[in-house]
Image (cartoon, coloured by chain):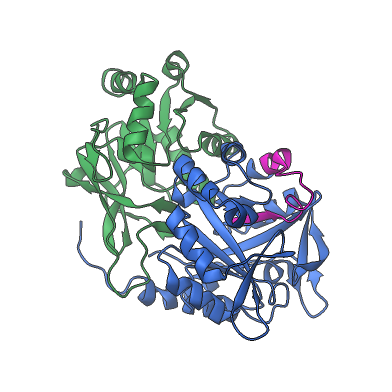
Amino acid sequence: MLRPRIIPVMLLKGRGFYKTRQFRTPVYVGDPINTFRIFCEKEVDEIVVLDIEATSSGRGPRLDLIEDIASECFMPMAYGGGVRTVEQARSILKLGVEKIVLNTVAVEEPEVISHIADLAGSSSVVVSIDAKKKMFGGYDVYIRSGTKKARLDPVTLAKQAEQLGAGEILINSIDRDGTMEGYDLSLIEQVANAIDIPVVACGGCGSLDDLESALDSSASAAAAGSFFVFQGRHRAVLISYPSAEDLARIAKRQQSRHQPSTSGTI
Amino acid sequence: MIGIIDYGLGNPAAIHNMLRRIGIHSIVSGNQAELASADKLILPGVGAFDEGMRSLAARDLIQFLDEQVKAKNKPLLGICLGMQLLGIGSEEGNLPGLGFLPMTFQKFKPLPDSQMKKLHMGWNEVQPVQESPLLAGFDRTPSFYFVHRFFAVCAEQNDLLGRSTYGTQFPSVVGRHNVLGVQFHPEKSHKFGMHLLRNFAEGY
């Protein structure tokens, strides 16, 4: 049976991993290589690394660091941050990375989505959407690490990304980021119900129940940052990941939704 | 030494990294002379079927693989698209495959009102169907990372080594003598993948 993926999202700043709260106040979490090694030992389903300075600083992806991380990565890895061209995507994929995450460029030059999908296949292209609640209902999309409002809403962007060849949507709630108070389920549902490609929910996870509620809201996979790196009320840094038993339990409950019946034999 | 075939598609570096991790010497190459010096070959691949066959043809590797597999009896493991290319053809394209195994590929058809996607992406179990060195010695049912839209239909049941379920049951591990294929990505499947790649390196 296909298990829903549970995915740690790590934020790269300088040469360290950080965790933000509502996209602000980054707290140092650890050295990327070490952190990766720990996640690898814990056999995580997949991992996402987002360089949150690559676009704002104008420097683009740090290929040397991505290479160091990918060479010890025996699980699927997605990288995002500062990717604007097919050439950049090509060099990153060559290092042993499976997926390219596009955020700012997906709004500013959406055709890049198609170009990378043509090069590497749709399943290698993830469009990440950072959404923030509007004062009087609805959501705005933000780009450039949440600093610039884009003139469209998350559902429109998700549909457009799907049409252009994105294989997956990573939907992140800026309001919930780092709060560990639960996902924005209505945001997840709106986006997941509007498109046919898998949606990865992100932003606000603080418990195993939260992971499940995101999956219940039609997300194909649930991602989190703080939940996998902080422990206890004082948010001491401790890398963790649900046990195999917990994952199996979650998978079993989701099974009926994802695979309602098995037809045919071989 | 294992030769990982570099024909411009897929991610030979990831396979090379994992083989290095488990202490198995490998090279990544698209050069016939270099690949001919390897004891075993791995055909990786991500992307469209016809693009895969065209890329092999552009590097003169179709005839070369035929000789290596049939005349020299060299073990060959196809991974993901690499497995699909071992067959006769695919619904996805028009070009013939390498034809080493009598299998074709068809699209997943999501059941109505289900959350099932056209793309099978994520971790799924592989149930062994018959004994084979490739699937030997796992201490529990292994899970692997899959990303694909097309699945195999085997003409010969004997070629089916392991199967998985996504809406329908489908062959996820196939093989006959020295030709083997896995629909998933062992190089991205933690210790299960390491175990399987070691089985390939040592069992054939």
Q: Is residue B5 above or below residue A143?
A: above
Asked if residue A253 can be seen in this view, the reply is: yes
Q: Image check: B53 left or right of A190?
A: left
Q: Which chain is blue?
A: A
User: Magenta stretch?
Assistant: A47-68
Residue A68 lies in what quarter of the image? top right
Q: Which chain is green?
A: B
Residue at position x 47%, y 30% from top?
Answer: B8
Q: Position of residue B62 (x, y in %)?
A: 31, 23
Residue at position x 48%, y 55% from top?
Answer: A166
Q: Is residue A192 above or below residue A164?
A: below
Residue at position x 61%, y 78% from top?
Answer: A183
Residue at position x 22%, y 67% from top?
Answer: A263
Q: Residue furthest left?
A: B155
Nearer the observer, B142 or A85: A85
- Quadrant (top left, top right, bottom left, bottom right) of the N terminus of chain A: bottom left
